[in-house]
Amino acid sequence: MSDAVLSQFKQAAVEETKVDTNKKLKVGIIGTGWIAESHIQSYKIQPDVEIVAAADLIPGKAEKFMERFGVSGVLFYPSHK
């Protein structure tokens, strides 16, 4: 009986969309602690996102963080202000 009920439903077609990479969302990371690792990994796999800035209160921490994740061309700031 359950097969008869389930066979009534059809899987919706998945429409693949193309991402326009000509326009990029520019992001800055404030704080380069452990949660920033998840954020940067997600940003790096998105073709329409560009990491442009990083800030951390500890001098040199943001620079080392970006270097560790292979991100270059980033502006560094000593705070979010």
Image (cartoon, rainbow, N blue to C red):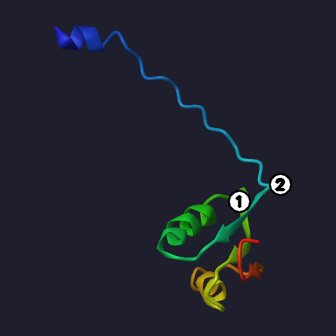
Q: Sequence order check: which comes first, mark 2 or mark 1?
A: 2
Q: Amino acid at mark 1?
A: Val
Q: Amino acid at mark 2?
A: Asn
Residue 44, quarter of picture: bottom right
Residue at left 30%, top 13%? 7
Q: Residue furthest front?
A: 81
* Residue 22 pos. (x, y %): 83, 54
Bin the neighbour count of mark 1 within 10 Å (Cα to Cα): few under 14, some 14-19, many 20 and up: some
Residue at left 66%, top 87%? 63
Q: Residue furthest bottom?
A: 60
Using the image, determine if residue 42 lies above or below residue 69.
above
Using the image, determine if residue 26 lies above or below residue 73.
above
Residue bearing the label numbered 1: 49
Residue bearing the label numbered 2: 22
- Disc 2 + disc 1, Cβ < 8 Å: no
Q: Where, quadrant-wise, is the N terminus in this rendering?
A: top left
Residue 59, quarter of picture: bottom right
